[in-house]
């Protein structure tokens, strides 16, 4: 597989995940561009480009958050690119979920996106983020607890995922 083939096949999925992590379309596009630049430099030495790209995506989003002084955005702007249908086809629920996710820390958001959007196991999530399994478990618990407070209307959805 060539780098161009990889980009054509993975760009939309990377951009959707980046949007969920950043909460902003422009930031998501910047994040994906950064990931692809890092991937291109190392392309010949990487065994699993998809896993590498995902790991850089999540770790870079947390790094950006730290550099910005731990600023957590309060609202999302724009629509995620080619987003999948919301659970149950309820646009209001999807909007509430996006706004609630935007109020989590980037690490919590990354863990939830990996666990429930990307459908990764706890071990896969830990490996992609470069953290311990216990960190994934505690961040997931804290994130879900915070979502229950921020958006009580999501309680039925959150109960299904835990």
Image (cartoon, rainbow, N blue to C red):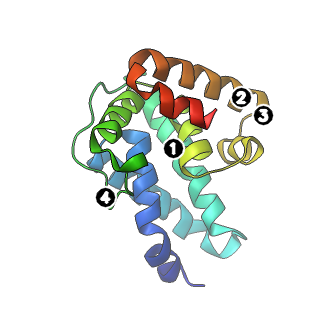
Dot 1 crowding, Cα within 10 Å, few <14, some 14–19, many 20+: some
CB contact under 8 Å: marks 2 and 4: no
**CA–CA distance in space, label 2 to label 4:** 29 Å
**CA–CA distance in space, label 1 to label 4:** 20 Å
Q: Give the total of numbered labels.
A: 4
Which of the numbered marks, if any, corresponds to residue 81?
4
Dot 4 crowding, Cα within 10 Å, few <14, some 14–19, many 20+: some
Residue at 78% across, 34% down: 133
CB contact under 8 Å: marks 1 and 4: no
Secondary structure of the residue carrying tag 3 is helix
Given residues 99 and 19, the one toward you in this image is: 99
Secondary structure of the residue carrying tag 1 is helix
Residue at numbered disc 1: 60
Secondary structure of the residue carrying tag 4 is loop
Residue 88 position in % (x across, y down) = 41, 48
Dot 2 crowding, Cα within 10 Å, few <14, some 14–19, many 20+: some
Which of the numbered marks, if any, corresponds to residue 133?
3
CB contact under 8 Å: marks 3 and 2: yes
Residue at 49% across, 29% down: 156
Mark yes or no: residue 69 visible: no
Residue 41 position in % (x across, y down) = 55, 67
Looking at the image, tell me whether mark 2 or mark 4 is earlier in sequence order. Answer: 4
Given residues 31 and 74, the one toward you in this image is: 74
């Amino acid at each position: 597989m060539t780098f161009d083939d990889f980009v054509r096949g993975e760009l939309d999925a990377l951009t959707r995940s980046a949007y969920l992590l950043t909460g902003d379309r422009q930031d998501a596009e910047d994040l994906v561009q950064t990931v692809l630049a890092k991937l291109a430099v190392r392309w010949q030495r990487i065994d699993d480009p998809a896993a590498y790209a995902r790991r850089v995506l999540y770790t870079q989003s947390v790094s950006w958050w730290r550099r910005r002084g731990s600023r957590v955005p309060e609202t999302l702007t724009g629509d995620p690119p080619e987003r999948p249908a919301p659970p149950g086809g309820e646009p209001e629920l999807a909007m509430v979920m996006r706004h609630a996710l935007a109020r989590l820390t980037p690490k919590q958001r990354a863990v939830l996106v990996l666990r429930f959007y990307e459908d990764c196991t706890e071990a896969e999530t830990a490996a992609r983020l470069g953290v311990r399994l216990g960190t994934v478990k505690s961040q997931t618990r804290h994130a879900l607890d915070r979502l229950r407070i921020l958006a009580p209307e999501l309680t039925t959805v959150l109960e299904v995922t835990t």
